[in-house]
Amino acid sequence: MLDKSLIDSIKSISDSISFDEESQIFNIEKVDEWLEISTKVKELGFDYLMCITSIDLEDGNLSLAYNLNSTGSQASLEFNLIFSADAEVPSVESLWKTADWHEREAYDMMGIKFSGHPDMKRILLPHDWEGHPLKKDYEVADYYHGMYVPKDKTSWE
Amino acid sequence: MSDSKLIDNSNIHTEDMVLNMGPQHPSTHGVLRLKIHTDGEVVSKIEPIIGYLHRCFEKHSENLTYEQVIPFTDRCDYLSSMHMTHAYSMAVEKMLDLEIPERVEYIRVITAELQRIASHVFFIGVFGLDLGAITPVTWMFKDRERIIDLFEMLTGARLLYNYVWPGGVSHDIPEKFVQRTKEFLDEFEPKLVEIDQLLSTNKIFIERTADVGVLDKDIAINYGVSGPTLRASGVDFDLRKKEPYSIYDKLDFEVPVGKGDMGTVGDSWDRYNVRYLEIKESIKILRQCLDSIPEGDVHEALPRKIRPKKGTIYSRYESSRGDVGFYIKSDGKNIPSRVKMRSPAFSNLCILPYLSEGWMISDVITILGSLDIVLGEIDR
């Protein structure tokens, strides 16, 4: 359970932040404001970015979950951004360097575009890979570099 | 003509050399490729290229039931499989709001600490090997083998155990397991002095590691570094103390942090020493647990079917490499809608370009070795 004063001070940063009591998650409606919001959040002592998770919501929208931690007070926060699949999200690489590789992974796996990232390219998959595999509507290509990709694998068993 | 040079160097054309290390290289601890830009022998830039071991763990998880994901987590960090299954099980338990029997928690901590010793012992061996010392690796493998034998006795498998399940463990510990583990500890503990004599105070080892790759506290936090690598930089951060899970709040142990005994705080020697000291703490924890393991049924809390209600969860766990996080999103079905693993070595490796800048190529091996990465976990 988060501290009441902490919740209020985070909510006062911007009008687009809403707090969900049950799940203890901050939801952000306007993605464009994310860099300004996160700058203020970092000033509150949240110096450790644990994880960035990209989620396909299957209704044309994508979501990003940022899990932050404060090494001083040990408080943990979660911010949730929901945006349409073609929107650009401001990169927080300048605030937390962890975000560099995590954002590259989110781009690689989910196709989320980050604005202001210094080196946006694929990280886990080969650079010539087509599509973003963690999207729910991803379909395996028929050929990879001229090699046929077998889809019926019953004969392997 | 004393003031004129015989050779005029100003017009010589120089350029950076790009050296490729890996994907198959003994010092990269797996299949990691490093693109090293060097100015002579000095490194000016490093580009780590990862993904060679990518096995689609997260995509697979979306098509499997919660139980079926457990063996996949084993294979993420194959040097500390127990930690991975424990971390995943804890996340699922948090979703289900399960109460775990005391005996299960004790067994889990015993396996986790044995695994931590095995992983750190392995690190000391291969770190020595990276620096050209052959003896440590042969000695350390001997001790690690004893732990693996214990795990074989416990689970039937030597590396990938599938032992910790959400709600419990797969089966109770065998009759003689506690006694055998105590015997192992009694034999292993005096041997730690040998490690000290072999590496910690070795002159060549100190010269290769002290003051090399100094990682500053603030930068470590900014890069999301965790585990022994972070603690070596002087940050007293251990989830077992800060956010105690399982029974760690009942146990008495210290958290070793880097003090810069041989050079600066946060150098490669500190990263080695913190792991060495952690072995001692793990032995301390093991002795406490083995003496007071309660009776009970390990299958008591196993859920008949795992079907968490809608929502998301983020759970943290202190593995031998650092802070493992599991982000799980549930749609209310028996298969997870999204599983994301926050891999500690993934964030630890991303500091390598920063740390290696300005060092010689041979020091890059030292720095990379001291980060103790496992590529299976980075690539997932």
Image (spheres, grey):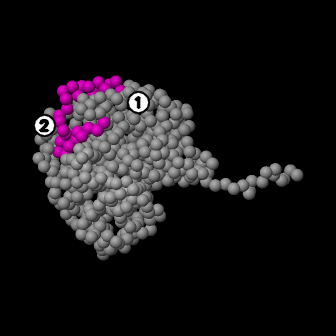
The residue indicated by pointer 2 is B297
Q: Chain of mark 1?
A: B
Residue at image point 40% right, 49% down: B52
Residue B36 on image: x %, y %: 54, 50
Local crowd size for mark 1, using a 10 Å CA cut-off: few (<14), some (14–19), many (≥20): some
Local crowd size for mark 2, using a 10 Å CA cut-off: few (<14), some (14–19), many (≥20): some
Residue closest to the far right:
B1
Residue at image point 18% right, 60% down: B331
A35 with respect to A156 (left or right)? right
Q: Hey, which quadrant is residue B321 in on the image?
A: top left
Say what amino acid the circle numbered 1 marks. Met
Mark in front: 2 vs 1: 1
Which tag, 2 or 1, sits closer to the chain's start?
1
Quick check: B189 above or below B45? Answer: above
Q: Is residue B86 visible?
A: no
Say what amino acid the circle numbered 2 marks. Asp
Residue at image point 39% right, 59% down: A129
Q: CA distance from mark 2 to mark 1?
A: 35 Å
Residue A152 on image: x %, y %: 25, 52
Q: Hey, which quadrant is residue A106 in on the image?
A: bottom left
Residue B190 on image: x %, y %: 38, 25
**Mark seen at residue B140:** 1
A116 with respect to B250 (left or right)? right
Q: Chain of mark 2?
A: B
